Amino acid sequence: MNRKYLFALAPVAMLAACGSQSEDAADPTPTASPPTPTLLGSATLSLADGKSVGTAELNGNGEEVSISVVLSGLPEGVRAVHLHTTGSCEAPDFASAGGHLNPGMHEHGKENPKGAHLGDLPNATIDANGDGTITAALTGTQADVRAAIFDTDGTAIVVHQDQDDYKTDPTGNAGGRLACGVFAAS
């Protein structure tokens, strides 16, 4: 082959090689974005006098369900938050909400070897401005959690006067009930 011809092809071959390398370096496969959570239900929490002090949202993502609670206007301190068996919030003591949501018939608390209830949630730390939040994953498949929360008598979310000790059955020594809200399906 003619030497001039080879020298003329060399730059073309190098450019082609560079082009194929950059194409190989870039992954042409699009990355999948994470699934968007679906709002399953929500509740507005109120004090016994009817003043709104927060919201709670249940979100589904695949088989998982999470809860997000935003609180405001509460006394400073650490407060227990639980899901209760009945979707009723009759003032002044919210006793109509029943006990903790516990379809698995476990004992109370994440530190209890026989626990925890589906309704056992993390404590909320309420700051000096009266604000606090919690976010938690609920135990069970989305179908099971939805069936338990949106059953025929519904489910309430309750903020208690004291903190949950995460082990004492059946309530975690959480004290009286400060605020309550009833979940409505979305």
Image (tube, rainbow, N blue to C red):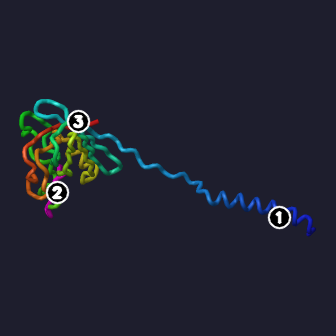
Q: Which residue, given by chain and number where applicable, does mark 2 sit on?
A: 116
Q: Residues within 10 Å of mark 2 (few under 14, many from 20)?
A: many
User: Where the N terminus falls, by quadrant?
Assistant: bottom right
Which residue is painted at 71% across and 57% down in the image?
19
> Residue 14: within the magenta?
no
Q: Is residue 55 above or below residue 81?
A: above
Image x and y of residue 30, in percent: 54, 51
Q: Which residue, given by chain and number where applicable, does mark 3 sit on?
A: 184
Instruction: Give the spatial CA distance, label 2 vs label 1.
Output: 72 Å
Q: Which residue, given by chain and number where applicable, does mark 1 sit on?
A: 10
Image x and y of residue 15, in percent: 76, 59
Which of pointers 2 and 1 indicates the residue nearer the eye? 1
Which residue is painted at 87% across and 66% down in the image?
6
Image x and y of residue 50, in percent: 14, 30
Instruction: Give the spatial CA distance, label 3 vs label 2.
Output: 24 Å
**What amino acid type should be assigned to the residue bearing mark 3?**
Ala
- Mark earlier in primary sequence (1, 3): 1
Tell me the SS state at disc 3: strand
Question: What span is in magenta?
Answer: 112-119
Image x and y of residue 8, in percent: 87, 62
